[in-house]
Image (cartoon, helix red, strand yellow):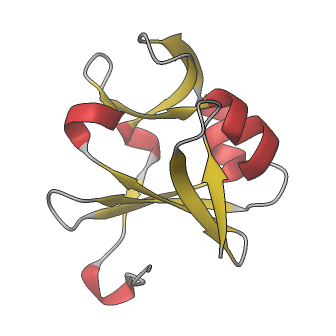
């Protein structure tokens, strides 16, 4: 599993088998208006988009998991800066909630 780092050197996720796994906390990673999940734009462009086909978010507060294809993320993302540098966000309607039986445990 390869770790993905933000431009500030923090681990923001891991890549395994073409899937980018990111643990999220809605209080930190969710944009309120419009309701969206956000991630570091530079890391996405450099480390995620070229090597992955899917993004999976793991909500650390509720045990829910969401997924979206890289293609869908790139097509519908928008850019923002909420004091954490350039980020990309994708509104909730483009994410698919993964049923519990299909979820994968990630280290």
- Identify the residue at the far bottom of this view: 101
- Quarter of image, res 79: top right
Residue 69 image position (x, y, % from top left): 63, 56
The relative height of residue 85 versus residue 96 in the rendered view (above or below) is above
Depth order, front residue of 94/5: 5
Q: Quadrant of the N terminus?
A: bottom right
Q: Is residue 84 above or below residue 66?
A: above
Residue 14, image x, y percentages: 58, 64
In the picture, measured across the screen, residue 17 lies left or right of residue 97, that is right
Q: How many marks?
A: 0
In the image, taking residue 33 as reference, residue 18 lies left or right, namely right
Q: Quadrant of the C terminus?
A: bottom left
The residue lying toward the viewer, choosing from 75 and 79, is 79
Name which residue lies at 38% across and 40% down: 93
Residue 93 visible, this orientation: yes
Residue sitting at x 50%, y 29%: 89
Left/right of residue 29 with respect to residue 26 in the rendered view: right
Q: Is residue 11 above or below residue 103?
A: above
Q: Left of 70 or right of it: where is 82?
A: left
Tell me where residue 87 appears, x and y as whole percent.
Answer: 56, 23
Q: Residue 70: x, y in percent?
A: 68, 51
Residue at 29%, 16% (x, y): give it. 33
Q: Residue lying farthest right?
A: 50
Q: Which residue occupies the foreground of this view, 75 or 105? A: 105
Query: Which residue is depicted at the point 42% across and 83% down?
Result: 104
Whether residue 20 can be seen here:
no
């Amino acid at each position: 599993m390869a770790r993905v780092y933000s431009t500030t050197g923090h681990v923001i996720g891991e890549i395994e088998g073409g899937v980018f796994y990111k643990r999220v906390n809605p209080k930190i990673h969710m944009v309120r208006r419009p309701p969206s999940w956000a991630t570091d734009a530079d890391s996405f462009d450099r480390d995620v988009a070229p090597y992955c086909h899917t993004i999976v978010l793991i909500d650390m507060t509720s045990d829910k998991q969401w997924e979206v294809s890289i293609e869908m993320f790139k097509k519908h993302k928008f850019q923002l800066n909420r004091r954490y540098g350039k980020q990309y966000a994708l509104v909730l309607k483009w994410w698919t909630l993964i049923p519990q039986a299909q979820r994968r445990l990630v280290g």
